Amino acid sequence: MSDEKEFQLNPTPHLDELEKGPWPSFISGFKELAKRTGNTMVRGALDQLNYSYETRLGYWKGGVVGVHGYGAGVISRYSMIPDLFPEAKEFHTVRIQPPPGLHYNTKKLRFLCDTWERLGSGLINMHGQTGNLQMIGIGQDNVQEFFDEVNKEGWDLGGAGAVVRTGASCVGPARCDQACNDNLKLHEKMLTYFTDLVHRPQLPYKMKMKFAGCPNDCINSIQRADMSFIGTWRDDIQQDDAEVEKFIDEKGMDYVVNNVITRCPTNAITLEGKKMVIDNKDCVRCMHCLNVMPKALSPGKDRGLTMLLGGKGILKMGNMLGAVIAPFMKCETDEEIEAVIEFVENIIDYWADNALDHERVGEFMERIGMHQFLEDMELDATIEMVNHPRDNPYFKASHDHDPLAKKG
Ligand code: SF4
Ligand code: SF4
């Protein structure tokens, strides 16, 4: 750090181009931060980035940086040209786990920011693709001290590498009427239970978990998580007939027919006058009617979650969506949540014992086949697990099949 009055930035003509135009520029943010705090590390990062634009090469390389007792959570960044830009010779990233639903209080955030400005660069990415608070830019000598200080206030490192990664959840019941379960509580309990697997790499590869409160899946868990927990219901959609009638009176019959009835993907809704009739066994929980008519329609009362497995971005195979592995599990009481965690632990153990190195759970399932996976996990096949319905005309489900119906 240097005296604020004497602190000067170096010329960065290539980066200056990125400040032109109407959009906010991260370069302006970097410059403002460096000038305000006198942080030479940020100035060095700007200088090296400008040089990268000049030479069209990146100059960061990895290494090993960590804190005591942890095998993951700090992403090392060493400059390959420290002699040219000594101020940026180290620029490590510390991943910090956010709270479920990203609900912070200002006191905790202020403490985190002040500590980071004192020991690191002051740059924070909220939130990285991993869901973490990414604290970008710190020297190795300060990593342990930063971690110790924020850890005392309850913050913990996030996951990196072959571990259970930092979880992510939508705002859930804290702020959303559509939530069918307390996904925030499930997130907190799940990640707490697997803390050891978050911090000490011992899995074939990464395992990401995301928790959505309802099938709208605002957290994109189906695409982005190896394990996806989505709130749902298994009884009938709740209807308020008076509100349905009011909605029809306000919007008109054409609107309701064209925007609700005909847009149900399974034609489960009909109208009898101004009364809505939903054939609930045909409802696939797409959420469309509930989203359009939130006052008139809401999820059923018998709520729980659907669990999917295998979503991921491009790796050995292309992008994959999660496949249903448990159509419905209750998750309200502590005992029910413990049963979900036990189910998850069995899957992780089985995958860890049998997967190839660097094989995500979705790729593993593809390789051994769903049939083998279900057999080994002692799970029954259900119709929700069919990836491509109607592919084969010689198989069909019986008409009265309703896997979500209560047994006994
Ligand atoms: Fe609300 Fe559902 Fe979106 Fe979560 S996923 S924020 S519960 S609509
Ligand atoms: Fe149809 Fe979707 Fe409404 Fe179910 S939630 S009744 S599938 S529109």
Image (cartoon, grey):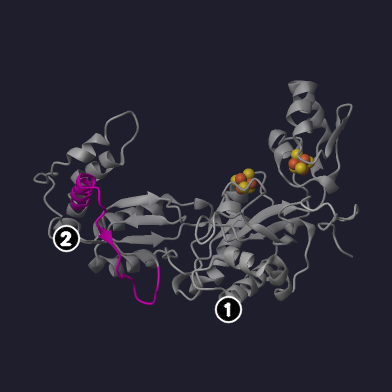
Circle on res. 82? 2
Point 45% across, 74% down: residue: 201
**Residue 60 colored in magenta in the image:** yes
Q: Is residue 59 left or right of residue 312?
A: left
- Quadrant where the N terminus lies? bottom left
Query: Mark 1 vs mark 2: which is more N-terminal?
Result: 2
Residue type, mark 1 in image? Asp
- Taking the image as four quarters, which one is ligand 2 found in? top right
Q: Is residue 400 above or below residue 239?
A: below
- On the image, the x and y values in percent for residue 395 come to 84, 56
Point 86% across, 27% down: residue: 274
- As measured in the structure, the alpha-carbon distance from the residue carrying label 1 to the one carrying label 2 is 42 Å
Q: Residues within 10 Å of mark 2 (few under 14, many from 20)?
A: some
Is any atom of residue 189 visible in this view? no
- On the image, the x and y values in percent for residue 95 come to 39, 61
Point 35% across, 65% down: residue: 74
The quadrant holding residue 342 is bottom right
- On the image, the x and y values in percent for residue 280 come to 84, 46
Q: How many marks?
A: 2
**Residue 173 colored in magenta in the image:** no
The secondary element bearing badge 1 is classed as: helix
The secondary element bearing badge 2 is classed as: loop
Residue situated in front as seen by the camera: 231 or 320 = 320
Q: Is residue 85 above or below residue 24?
A: below
- Quadrant where the C terminus lies? bottom right
Q: Is residue 388 above or below residue 254?
A: below
Residue type, mark 2 in image? Pro
Q: Which residues are magenta?
A: 44-72
Disc 2 Cβ-to-ligand 1 distance below 8 Å: no
- On the image, the x and y values in percent for residue 134 come to 38, 55
Residue hosting label 1: 353
